[in-house]
Image (cartoon, rainbow, N blue to C red):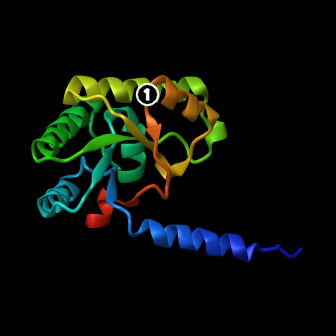
Amino acid sequence: MRIKRNYLSAIKRFLDWLFSRFKPLTVHTEAMVIDSVWEKVKREVSKGEVFKWYVMTPANLDYFKSEFNVNLSKNKISKILRDRYKWMLQHGQKLELHIHFSMIMGNISYKEQEKLFRESVTWFKGNLGIVPKEFVPGWWEYNEDTLKLCKKYGLRMIGERDYDYTHDFDFS
C-alpha cells in the first residue's frame, strides 16, 4: 500500500515553523532540577534573551523520574524548584505554567488532568506567590478536557507556533 502525502500541508507546516523562529524566545523548563542544567539556565538569564519561561512543578514528579532519572523526593524537588524559580523572578524573569500529561491523551482522564492542574496552580501560588496566566502542554498534547481545565483555572493555552521555543536541557 502506498501512503499518499500532502506536500502543500508539509510546506505550510514548514513555513509556520520558520515564521515562529522570528517570534520572542520562550523556554520550557523540564530539567531545571538538575544542577548542570541550572548552571546553564543562570547563564541564559544573564543574557536577557528569553521572553518567558514555561516551568514545571513537582506535580510532574513521575516525569522527572522517567525522563531524567531524577531520584529525589517530591519535597526535595519542590524546594529546589522553588529556590530556583524565586531566583529567576528576582532577576526579572517571567514564569508561566508547563505540565506534561501524556503523549497519548486518550490514556489520561479528566480527573487525572485536573489533579495535575490543581496541584501545579496551587504550588505556583503557595511557593512563588504568583498565579499563572498561561499554560503550555508537554509534547504539545492536549484534548477537550485540557481546554475545559484551562478555562476553569483561567489559563490561556499557548500553541506551538505562538512563540519561538526551546527547552532548558537544550542549553547543556
Q: Quadrant of residue 60?
A: top left
Q: Which residue is mark 1?
A: 154
- Name the residue: 36% across, 34% down: 133
Pinpoint residue 68: horizontal percent, then vertical percent.
35, 52
Q: Quadrant of residue 132?
A: top left
Check the image and report above or below for 111 versus 138.
above
How many marks the image carries: the answer is: 1
Pinpoint residue 79: horizontal percent, then vertical percent.
18, 33
- Name the residue: 25% across, 58% down: 50
- Seen from the viewer's position, the closer of residues 162 and 115 is 162
Residue type for callout 1: Gly
- Seen from the viewer's position, the closer of residues 92 and 106 is 92
Pinpoint residue 141: horizontal percent, then vertical percent.
56, 47
Check the image and report above or below for 34 versus 19.
above
Pinpoint residue 28: horizontal percent, then vertical percent.
35, 52
- Name the residue: 57% across, 73% down: 14
Quick check: 104 left or right of 134?
right
Q: Secondary structure at mark 1?
A: loop
Which quarter of the figure is the N terminus placed in?
A: bottom right
For mark 1, does the 10 Å Cα neighbourhood hold few (<14), some (14 to 19), or many (20 or more) residues? some
Q: Residue furthest right?
A: 1
Q: Quadrant of residue 26?
A: bottom left
- Name the residue: 32% across, 34% down: 58
Which quarter of the figure is the C terminus placed in?
A: bottom left
Check the image and report above or below for 152 versus 143.
above
- Seen from the viewer's position, the closer of residues 16 and 169 is 16
- Seen from the viewer's position, the closer of residues 18 and 100 is 18
